[in-house]
Image: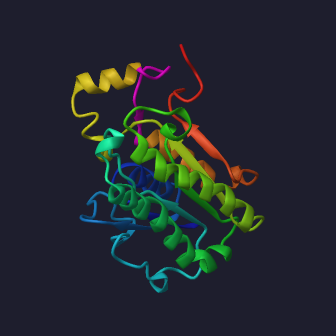
Amino acid sequence: MATYLIIGASSGIGKATAQQLVEQGHQVIGTYYQTTPKDLDTVEFFSLNVLEQELDASQLPETLDGIVYCPGSINLLPFARIKPQDFLNDYNLQVIGAIKTIQACLKKLKKGHQPSIVLFSTVAVQHGFNFHTQVAASKGAIEGLTKSLAAELSPTVRVNCIAPSITQTPLAGKLLGSDAKIDVNAQRHPLKKIGQAKDIANMVRFLLSEEASWITGQVLSVDGGMSTLKI
């Protein structure tokens, strides 16, 4: 049994990942921002606002085998309408939040068995979409962090990043709020469907496992073929 910390385990990809890890018999410690999911009573939850609070690592076990950092935002606006503070807010949530979490837990993580860190980017970093500058700027920083940190922490800790396309989660609710919106977005993908939280969780679970023991410093696309195929 391994012990994993999931920041943002109460919904979406974080919740799906927690469910899969618990089903495999692992210990999962998860954070929530507003409400605790009632259908995940096997996860040890505590409240954390990553923008306003420091993670108290003393409340965690002495050994961690993996960290998954899930908090994110999807703010799609024309560049001219985005204030510099908006970029900074996203950077603090997605990049600084991840950095503070990893720094707080690093000693415990280094004691783990083949420890692994999983972060999240987006297909929009490498592909380029209209109105995605705010999203892509902070997620591009995550990709750089992934590669540099993987080099620095090798061979002890593996660090990888998943770059999804739009996924059916509460975070994407405004973009996928009707059958028509779902269909339009699905047709943009070679596989003609929208990704589900479990699709991304499958990759997270793999990257945390010993099966991925020779994978580090990678940005892995799980995006229905969006980033590489044109059909």
Which residue of the protein is positioned furthest toward the left in this rendering? Answer: 178
Could you tell me which quadrant the N terminus lies in? bottom right
Horizontal side of residue 215 vs 48, given as left or right: right
Residue extent of the magenta highlight: 188-197
Residue 159 versus residue 182 in the image, above or below: below
Q: Is residue 189 magenta?
A: yes
Count of numbered marks: 0
Residue drawn at (49%, 42%) of the image = 122
Q: Is residue 202 magenta?
A: no
Residue 87 versus residue 125 in the image, above or below: below
Between 110 and 209, the residue placed more toward the observer is: 110
In the rendering, at what x and y percent does residue 55 appear?
43, 78
Between 230 and 173, the residue placed more toward the observer is: 230
Q: Quadrant of residue 175?
A: top left
Residue drawn at (39%, 66%) of the image = 43
Magenta segment main secondary structure: loop
Residue drawn at (52%, 41%) of the image = 125
Question: Could you tell me if residue 131 is visible in this image?
Answer: yes
In the rendering, at what x and y percent does residue 91 appear?
43, 60
